[in-house]
Amino acid sequence: MIKTNYGQAGRYIDLFAPAIIGMLLFVYIVIRAIVIPVTHDEVQTCLYFSQMPVWDIIAYRDPIPNNHILNTLLVKLFVSISGWHELSIRLPNILGFMVYFGFAMGVIRMISKHFLVTLFCMAALFFNPYFLEFFSLARGYALSTAFMMASVFYLLRFMKDPSPGRLGAATASGMLATYTNFTALNYFVAFIMIAGVLITSSRQAKARKRQQVAVLVAGTGLLALATWLPVSRMVATDQFIYWGQSGFYEDTIKSMWVAFALHPDHFHIPYYILTIAALLVIMIPLLFILPAWIRSRPVTRKEYQLLYLLPLATVAVNVLQHYLVQTPFLTGRTALLFFPLYGLACAGAAQISWDRFRRAAAGVMIVFIAVTGWHLAASANLKRSFEWWFDENTKDVISYLEQQQPENPAPSVTLNAHWWFTPSLEYYRVTTPLPWLQLAPYHKEPQPDSPYLFYYATDYDLPVLGKNYETVKSFGWNSRFLMKRRQP
């Protein structure tokens, strides 16, 4: 293990710089969770699924994938304790960041203690605004990656000390990741395969191996029992139509680049160039040691090998699953688990590179840190979610309408809205509450002849609504409009 050797000041930097970075990221996540309006998909989690009886949540009575079971149960718990504030419904994922950060730093410290390598690994595992935004939302994706990172940490510890307890912690964490979001099943299958190989190839007493196999079998059995009913109900009702069928590169990698860049043309670089560059970061170090691996020479620590194998095995499971049982490819936020997995491969590549060609590795790391750090700083905002950007002005609309209500009994203000906006408006109407506001039922087509006094619409609705409504306020660079019915 490489250690820093530049005095007491350097040791303080090594110790406190990662903690300061983590604290800043956590503050950013908390502020976003407080100030960003509740988004479209969060509303269904909160107002619908979390209000079901516990058994109906667990059994997937309504088999819509919006119900990320463990996340839904935690939202139900925190709302019962502290009410409907944005911070309450998003608290499970805020706390999830603490879990993710703690275990990710544990993995990094097992790999290297050199400051530049540590900072590079942190950039690979944390510096993505799209990934970070899910720790500020009441969805299960980020919380799932937190448990997945805990699983990786304990698996690395198991490699050093193959005790059933550490394997049990790794297995339980992988189970929680999957129970929080079913897309993590790809990771869990890869984890079971790799853990099985580690057990069978180790030089241990047979009794100890049997204990370890029993842990894996028990964990797999419990997870299968817990997920069988939800998954079977999703399959029976064809709930996988929202994913992709074109291929892993077309559906998963391209959609990840769009999301991670926060704009299709953010870098003005073709996706295949970005993909090649990302692969070179982790593949070049591997090429230097692959011949020795093939000859079974112990050229590098097993931890580095595992950090390569986990992402590769997870991708393989996802691809094989598609061709064997026709499960669609993951897209966008459903592919979020691949970000930390790629970061783990970068962590392994970083220390291998540092050990063998330090100057070149340092140059690549500095460029990587600078680009990802700039991207995070340039993309950071306290206004909107990238995925549900259209909900940015929900509170502004409500504030304006509140000023328009006359002095007569509620409801005194009537509002129709494009279907994008209705869930977020409904959340605040119900939970604030807003007795003076009457909101039109959810609908997909514009309703120019509706009797509602106000209409919150998109620019696409203007040609249809313009005959009966006039704009009173615009938002988002004239992409969203609050309109009022014209007087006869």
Image (cartoon, rainbow, N blue to C red):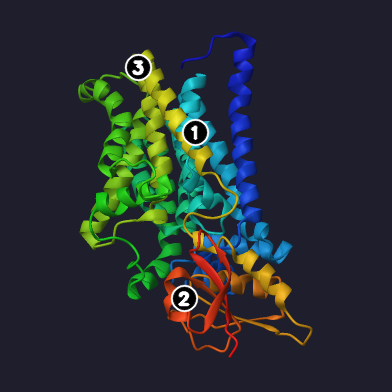
State how far apart marks 1 and 3 are (Cα). Answer: 20 Å
Crowding at mark 2 (Cα within 10 Å: few <14, some 14-19, many 20+): some
Task: Kindly give the residue lying farthest to the right in the view shown.
Answer: 407
Image x and y of residue 248, in percent:
26, 51
Residue corresponding to mark 2: 62
Q: Nearer the viewer, residue 204 or 488?
A: 488
In the picture shown, does residue 242 fall above or below 297?
below
Marker disc for residue 360: 3
Q: Callout 3, which amino acid?
A: Ala
Image position, residue 279 (x, y; %)? 29, 35
Residue 379 coordinates in the image, percent (x, y): 50, 44
At a point 57% along the width and 47% down the height, the residue shown is 381
Report which quarter residue 359 is drawn in: top left
Q: Disc 1 residue type?
A: Gly
Residue that label 1 marks: 373
Whole-angstrom CA distance, mark 2 to mark 3, is 54 Å
Q: Earlier in the sequence, mark 1 or mark 3?
A: 3
Residues at discs 2 and 3 in contact (Cβ within 8 Å)? no
- Alpha carbon distance from label 2 to label 1: 41 Å
Is 253 in front, or is 425?
425
Residue 112 visible to an observer of this rendering: no
| Left or right: 454, with 352 as reference point | right
Mark closer to the chain start, 2 or 1: 2
Residue at image location 25% in from the left, 42% down from the top? 272
Q: Residue at x 47, y 48 (%)?
A: 130
Tag 1 and tag 3, C-beta contact below 8 Å: no
Q: At 34% across and 41% down in the image, what residue appears?
A: 311
